[in-house]
Image: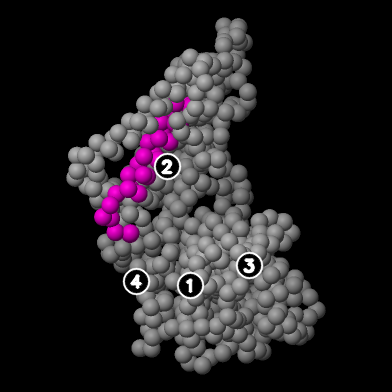
Amino acid sequence: MTVGKEAPPRHAAGDQGKREARPAGAAVDSTAAPEHPVLQYMVQNPELFAQNLARVVEEGGKALAAYLGPREAGEKKNELADELADVVKTIGQVSEFWLADPQRTMEAQTRLWSGYINLWDQSMRRMMGEQSTPAAEPDARDKRFRDPEWSANHFFDFVKQAYLITSRWAEDMVGRAEGLDPHTRQKADFYVRQISNALSPSNFVATNPELLRATLTSHGENLVRGMKMLAEDLREGKGDLKLRQTDATKFEVGRNLALSPGKVIAENAIRQVIQYSPTTETVRKRPILFVPPWINKFYILDLTPERSLVRWLVEQGHTVFLVSWVNPDETLAGKSFIDYMREGVIETLDVVCDVAKTDAVDAVGYCVGGTLLALTLAHLAKHGDTRIATATFLTTQVDFTHAGDLKVFVDEEQLDVLERRMREKGFLDGSKMASAFNMLRSNDLIWPYVVSNYMMGKEPFPFDLLYWNSDCTRMPAANHSFYLRRFYFENAFTKGEIEVDGTPLSLGDVRIPIYNLATREDHIAPAKSVFVGSGFFGGPVRYVVSGSGHIAGVCNPPSSGKYQYWSDGPPTGEFEGWLERAEMTPGSWWPDWDRWLRSHDDATVKARKVGSRKHKPIEDAPGRYVKMRV
């Protein structure tokens, strides 16, 4: 097998004769410079290569059995049909527009074939040694085509450009289709991008130069290892692919993650309360209460000592309390969003005020934990409860008009299917949410790992953040249904249509100071969505935008010297205008937040003991609840 290249061959026969066959399983450096530009794409040991292909088939059979076994045993239902039905229906609406008019059909085909003809013309010019211009070039941030062979080799360059022309044409077809409602257009755009990402030539052995080199120089051993890993990950996912993004054996919560000293001082069916031990002689009088998301586990705020927001706050002299949500099973199926408000936030507020001997708390909500906190604030305001003095929201949405690509999964038909599945189990599998989040950035969080794990046959590097990302939690059926329907689908909160005990709740009643943090590259809670939500609060709002995304932009310690944040006056007008006039400050937003907290109350007291007579320590932090696995 050969693939042409511009460089002329040198001493091919001699080089081939010097190469020795490696035994199966031997390590191969597929990234090393080739001995010869042609030899790198030739089978050097046909016999060994054939043996390894047979092993690939054998391991592939094990992978297929791992996928089919749970389905044949009735342990796993095939849900693919429901998901594909929505994709086909959505893309069909785009196709209907283009096929309804022969002239439009011809125009669409002409645009595509014009791109191909230009590619053919430029490729022929290049092969004849004439000056040529690429018909299509990848985005500078696109990591898929960084191997030099994607440009240096005629074949791979042609394949790359043909793919780019086709994928951009397909996305353009969605953009130009008239008569689509906004939700259908957003879904079509999302699905086309997912299909395009999946069909990238970088995902296939024969069309990816790095993969092809690895396969031929290792005589196919990489595919054997990859297929074995695929079977293992299918078994680990009980028939679904549990994509390994890191070496999970290198991490354990409480051993090298979530290490900040503290105690669990209270617990109920849905949460534990952690109080962290002080490290300073005096502490700020007003304590901090964290309400993290239950879609993920809280220790993203206490990942490692170097990146722990919890530890940093304790070192600055803050008393920190934190909610640790349970990983629910079918017994908690009926726990609603309102139950999480009452038992998760308000009962925790009672605990904190008792232990800290205070009637004023600074509350912090992260992601959906922030949405829950906002609802709680509106409820407390209706009842004249002023124990939360300030509130900080980290990448939190309260208005979902601009909620981004996650809205792709939320419409009446999809919600009906999801609610039916949740009723059967009592909860939503954490893997479903993890897959949805990964799909928002599939070229970063899915396909690179598919290629590296199952084609290159490489074990992923140990990475604490990706371990946390894969440490999934379930969602109770009643809670998750309420969240998706009332917030994402109906956007009922900012419309004043959510009631508790017959009383409608309004963010306009929340008049306490707000620190509202968004992140510039957030795909889950877009900065524009957070900006728009700021306008619904009844009190002063400090809106800040951090560099990076939903996680890295929040968990960015000052010591790292990374990223930046933007700040300006009140979040009024249009988001783009606010961002254009905002002042950029290099580094972490944490010190800015600390100054903001102290500007509202900087009184200090002697460092508090952990727990109280009423709420005695139960166990060491991080507690049992966070260690519960799916």
Q: Which residue is mark 3?
A: 567
Badge 1: few (under 14), some or many (20 or more) residues near its Cα, within 10 Å? many
For the residues labelled 3 and 1, the Cα–Cα distance comes to 16 Å
Three-letter amino acid code at the position of disc 4: Glu
Q: Which residue is mark 1?
A: 533
Query: In the rendered view, does 444 fall on the left or right side of 555?
Result: left
Residue 79 placement (x, y as % from top left)? 30, 53
Q: Residue furthest right?
A: 281
Residue 606 placement (x, y as % from top left)? 77, 84
Residue 197 is labelled as 2
User: Can I make out residue 437 in this image?
Assistant: yes
Q: Which circle's residue, 1 or 4, is located before the other in the chain? A: 4
Query: Which contiguous range is marked in magenta?
Result: 156-183
Image vertical order of residue 180 relative to residue 622, above or below: above
Three-letter amino acid code at the position of disc 1: Gly
Residue 490 is labelled as 4
